[in-house]
Image (tube, rainbow, N blue to C red):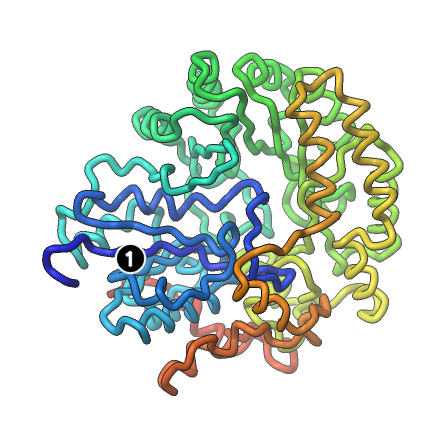
Amino acid sequence: MQAGRKSRILIVNAYFDPWRSATPTRLFVPRAMAPYYLAGYFNPALAEVRVWDEVYHGALLDRRQFEWPDMVVFTGLTAAFDRARQLLAYCRHFNPNVVGVIGGPIARALPAICDRVFDYSCQGDVEEIAEVIEAVLSRGHVSDATAPRFDLTSPSMGIAYLETTKNCNFACSFCSLSGEGRAYTAHSEHSIDSQLDAIGKAVCVMVLDNNFYGNNRGSFEWRVKKIGDRWRRGQFRGWGALVTGDFFKRPENLKLMAENGCKGIFSGVETLDPALLRTFNKKQSLSSDPLTLTEACAENGIFFDYGMIIDFAHQTVAEVDDQLSGLLANHRVPLPGLLSMTIPITGTPYFDKAAREGRMMPNVLLSDMDGQKLVEWPKEPVEKVVPFLRDLLKFRGRKSALTRHTLAHAWHWRKHFDLEQTILAAVRPLHRFGWNAGIGSPRQMYQSFKEPPLTYSAMTDQLRSAYQPQHRLPSRFESDFEPLQVTDENGALTDQFQSARVAPSSIAV
């Protein structure tokens, strides 16, 4: 690092787009906020920080970005390990002195291989980056305030983000939080106030908590009123949060949130099949009927959104088709904001059970586990499931029904919602399932153009183009572009993958 200039820090949210697009996805909500929380730990007087989110900004392809940093910090979902490794290889080639750091779900799920590949591998929360900053730079490079750098999120479309708790008090078998086993805790008043101060004026605030409701009613009510106080002071026009199914068992919860400016709630309905919910250990959602929850929320002026999971290892094509057709036939119920395959995420009880029972397909890569393709054997023939899945995820053959349902739903609930909520109800499903502009830089659009077609099955998908270096690199970097393979040709876990999961130290140096 050159004397007389600020240290250069690049923070990257690594991402493989499941649709094999390299262009930005700017309308996806919520955005990844971990990079901006990490950025707050660097003293701006001594460090210049840039953030690149491969969801929001598109694939990182610019050589100038790789040449620039003294330190590059990676975060992202577990399936993005290969991508983070590729990006570090580019940075190390163009700047051999760069320090590579990784944290978040990738480091916690794959501690041993992260210890080997990166200079620092952080197993804790964002606070742990302070130790790395002190070790690599100096104690003076650690910010005293540590407030998130929301100023770096521009443009934000008026949406701001806030975290009031960490982790979750439930243990759904498919959730990465269950695998990590960390305690559910609330942020301090100082932390919440500093985040709200950093937000400044906004149109709306999305609370990023995995479970805003939690298991401490006093804390829940205090946090609702804390946010409500800022809403009454005019800092933002409304806010939304994610809650678990048990939240709805007390009607007064909705009333309290509505009185304090809440305009939207997301909850993981996951499936309309009670047996499958029990399989997922998601008993808190057994009474989460989408119509009932939609009506209860609408009566309080709150927009209801939810996610659904498809699991062909336990469901037939006919069962899934019936569920979706039933939703399309009832305009009072919103369509799910998230529609995904069950992902056997590394380290979760669901993954361990799937591997133990031999449900994993052969030659599955870690990057295949993106929720948009088969990685487990379905209960029906693959050749029957794959074409249905391909059409389902893009609503092929259902576009007219999608449009009719969306407009009828927004019109039906218009008297309960304000104009912004009504527009959201009309636009969100059409954007999610109807179209994707795919506009980015010329290089990003070319990268998307040359991608091999998506087959929706891990057994037949070709490697995406990112596994071929986009810049000329020496042979010593070849291993950085080899995919991490989860299962072998027989569907058993590979030795490489097993060794990648060995227990970690706190910070590997």
Which x, y percent locates residue 323? Answer: 83, 44
Position of residue 169 in the picture relative to residue 12 (left or right): right
Q: Nearer the viewer, residue 340 or 427?
A: 427
Which x, y percent locates residue 166? Answer: 43, 38
Q: Amino acid at mark 1?
A: Ser
Q: Which residue is mark 1?
A: 506
Q: Nearer the viewer, residue 436 or 405?
A: 436
Q: Nearer the viewer, residue 208 or 379?
A: 208
Residue 431 in view, yes or no? yes
Res 352 → quadrant: bottom right
Q: Quadrant location of the N terminus?
A: bottom left
Q: Is residue 58 above or below residue 45?
A: below
Residue occupying the point 63% across, 45% down = 281
Residue occupying the point 61% across, 27% down = 264
Disc 1 is placed on an element classified as: loop
Which x, y percent locates residue 152? Answer: 37, 42
